[in-house]
Image: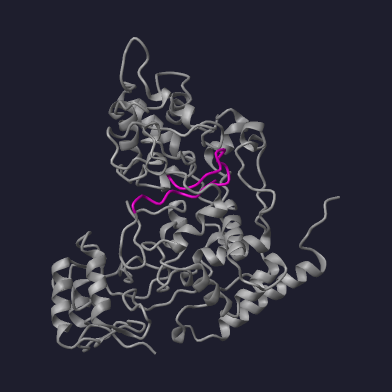
Amino acid sequence: MALNPFSGPRRRSLLGLATFITMFAVASNLGAQTQPVPVLPGQLPSYTAVLPPHFLTPVILQQDNTPAGNPVTDAGATLGRVLFHDKRLSSNQTVSCSSCHRQAAGFSDPRRFSIGLAGGLTGRNSMGLTNARWYERRAFFWDERAATLEDQVLQPIQNSVEMGMTLPALLTRLSGETFYGPLFNAAFGTPEVTADRISRALAQFVRSLVSTHTKYDAGVPVNFSNFTAEENLGRRLFNGEIGAATCVQCHGTDNFSPGPRINNNGLENPYVDKGVGAISGRAQDEGLFKVPSLRNVALTAPYMHDGRFATLEEVVEFYNSGVVAHPNLSPPLRARPPAQGALRLNLTTTEKAALVAFMKTLTDTSLISDARFTDPFPAVAFHDADQNRDNRISLPELTRVIELFSARKGTVRTGCYLVATTSTEDGFATDPDRSDTAAVTLTRYHAADSDRNGRISLNELLRVLQLYNYRADTLRTGQYRPQSGTEDGFAPGP
């Protein structure tokens, strides 16, 4: 009989840990803290993935990149979950791992490029983390510069654009938080905070993001009798049973991850971003990029390393007619002799739609709603611009907001700037019940939204900067409750 490592005294200690953290969170005045503390369930959940038979085949087992020295444990993944969502991991405490890997988006970023701690943009799209556990080459990042997941998770923390933290500073900061000691103790046996332990816990959490509950998975044991005719047509096209498509050669197995090859998929010639070639300096490596799993692909738009395609339809059309000939182009995408150059699939409109329909059967809605992976930190209502959380937006902080949104005009939302139940990109929550009457009777819209269209354009934001230029430090935030008669449209927080 298998022993449960979390039964008896061990389980009681974990229950005590969760109780301690929950009581600490309840007793804390979140409005007065720089960052909140996590709220965890009374009984820590299991992070052991129960895999269906089609995930236990030799070819998929070979793809598993879990090292023997860092298996996923309940306590380790719980610590990893807290670290993954904690903005303390960035130097100005405004960005977490989950800022660029959102659960609702299959743990990817719906923006082409992610926004770092000071408003700078990442050089590549943040790839989805679903089933990152299965990648036979074991390397991470689009250019595979990290040899293991344990190596990868520490790099964004130290990246000057993304999170801007040093490891010594991070260890000091986390060691000073009362709730982390019990979490590290439960995961590793002592409360000591080390970079190695942070790395291992984050890797455990990422490997626990397992998707096996899709329409596709339900179809495997019944020969896909649960599929529509369109979905089955797409499946047969994907697998090369009919037509000229070669999708399965780069997204093979029921995990839809590649084998030992890394591929050049003919996005362009020459490559602006050389991928692996930029790391190795070798011409034969130019245009080679990691191929992620297609699990939850319908949720992870935009697509490719640079997010150039907004929809799956665009992706399918690219492989149908847009692959560019390149010296390093992967064999499955080369034209069949005697033809030369890049492969052309010549799919019909019906066939292209069928491929998209099939890829949508790989969506696992349970993963994006699973409480084990959600943000454990209670929402704090401070405006994102208020970096030092002093209830005021200084002129430098307001300038940062302008710089942050200058590349994407008109995307700052206002509405009635209610406190959102989930964090919003720009610190505003939209009001679904907005009406013109409400706008007239109560000054609830941000003062910058001069045309009351629920959005702040760049020109409107510049106007705010000019308005406060001669009286810097007077823009209040706090809980930014709606309140009439205030000079700047903000109500001070408690």
Q: How many marks?
A: 0
In the image: residue 4, left or right of residue 54: right
At horizontal 31% and vertical 42% (from top left) the residue drawn is: 309
At horizontal 75% and vertical 72% (from top left) the residue drawn is: 13
Color theme of the render: one colour
Q: Quadrant of the C terminus?
A: bottom left
Closest to the observer, 343 or 136: 136
- The answer to whether residue 414 shows anywhere in this view is no
Question: x, y percentage for residue 276?
Answer: 41, 40
In the image: residue 406, left or right of residue 132: left
Instruction: Residue at the far front: name it.
Output: 281
Instruction: Residue at the far right: name it.
Output: 1
Question: Over which residues does the magenta segment extend?
Answer: 123-142
Residue 21, image quadrant: bottom right
Would you place residue 118 above or below residue 121 in this image? below
Question: x, y percentage for residue 112?
Answer: 32, 51
In the image: residue 254, left or right of residue 475: right
Instruction: Residue at the far top: name it.
Output: 338
Residue 134 is covered by the magenta coloring:
yes
Residue 429 is covered by the magenta coloring:
no
- The answer to whether residue 72 shows anywhere in this view is yes
Would you place residue 204 above or below residue 453 in this image? above
Question: x, y percentage for residue 117?
Answer: 36, 67
Closest to the observer, 365 or 229: 365
Residue 268, image quadrant: top left
Residue 78, image quadrant: bottom right
Closest to the observer, 107 or 63: 63
Question: x, y percentage for residue 373?
Answer: 55, 60
Would you place residue 56 above or below residue 73 in this image? above
At horizontal 59% and vertical 32% (from top left) the residue drawn is: 220
